Every structure is written in structure tokens, then in C-alpha cells.
Image (cartoon, grey):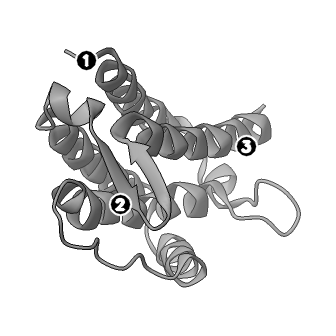
Amino acid sequence: MNQDKKQILAHYESSRMWVESLASVTEEQWRTPIAVVKWSIAEVIGHLIPWDEFVVSKRIPFLFMEDSLPKAPNVKEMNANAAHSSRLQSKEETMAKFLNCRRQLVNALHHLTDEQWQQSFQIGESELTLYRYFLGLVEHDLHHFLQIEKVLK
């Protein structure tokens, strides 16, 4: 298996375990903002869900097609809607949705060939490889996971 693919898959698998570990977080911790005027842990985890869904349904299937990619959603709107939903859901429901979406993402990545991991594609004006594209998403995850770890210490 391609090393880039292995690295990205390893992150997504470990991210599922990391979020599962949040089951021990109290309801108060789950709902407390990670900083002043910031989201709660619930909202941080919840906002990752629609982005995973978007990548699985609107990016991966279209990356190597000649047609243009489906339009990306409005970032602020999607994040705000996800944060709102997470405030209304139980911790267990948000975590289950995250874990399910991540599983679907991992499954989709497994189906990408080693050749596709080497191939370039275009998003807007940017030429990327799968590794570069997913590395940006991994860094986004890690940024939020670090925020959560800091607030839980």
C-alpha cells in the first residue's frame, strides 16, 4: 500500500479511537466552550461530521473525473448549522455520527488505488495530490483535537 495512503488512513483510524475516548468526558465538559467565544467540544466534534460527509459524497467520487467538482458549501453556514445541531444532540448521538462518518471516509479511502494517490487533480486554481488534499484535512483535525486536549487538562 502507498505510504501516503497508509499515513492518512492511520490518522483517520486513530481519530476514531480518540473521539471514542471522549465518552468519559462529563456532560459539563462536553458542553463547555474550549475558550472564550469558542465552540464547545460538542460543537467542535459535530462540525467535522458534515465535512466528512462532503468529502465522501462530493469530493472523492469526482476528483479524477474530467467534469468540474460539485460546488463546495458555504463554510460559515455549514459550520454554524453543524454547531447548532451538536448543541441539540446528545453526546452519544454526536459521537456515533462522527464515528460512522469517519468509518465511511476510511472505507472510501481504502478504495482509492495507489495510482490515484500519485495522480494530480485540480480544485479551483490549486493542483493537488490526494496526500496534499487529505494532509490539510488531517491538520484541521489535529488543530481541533489539540484545542480539546488543552481544555480537558
- Pointer 1 or 2: first along the chain: 1
Could you tell me how many numbered marks the image carries? Answer: 3
Judge by depth and name the residue closer to the eye, 69 or 57: 69
Say which mark, if any, is on residue 2: 1
How many neighbours does mark 3 have within 10 angstroms: few (below 14), some (14-19), or many (20 or more)? Answer: some
- Pointer 2 or 3: first along the chain: 2
Say which mark, if any, is on residue 93: 2
How many neighbours does mark 1 have within 10 angstroms: few (below 14), some (14-19), or many (20 or more)? Answer: few
- The picture places residue 153, in percent across and down from the top left corner, at 78, 31
Which structural element holds mark 3?
Answer: helix
Judge by depth and name the residue closer to the eye, 37 or 91: 37
| Gap between marks 2 and 3 measured at Cα | 21 Å
Say which mark, if any, is on residue 147: 3
How many neighbours does mark 2 have within 10 angstroms: few (below 14), some (14-19), or many (20 or more)? Answer: few
Say which mark, if any, is on residue 118: none
User: Which quarter of the picture shows residue 123?
Assistant: bottom left
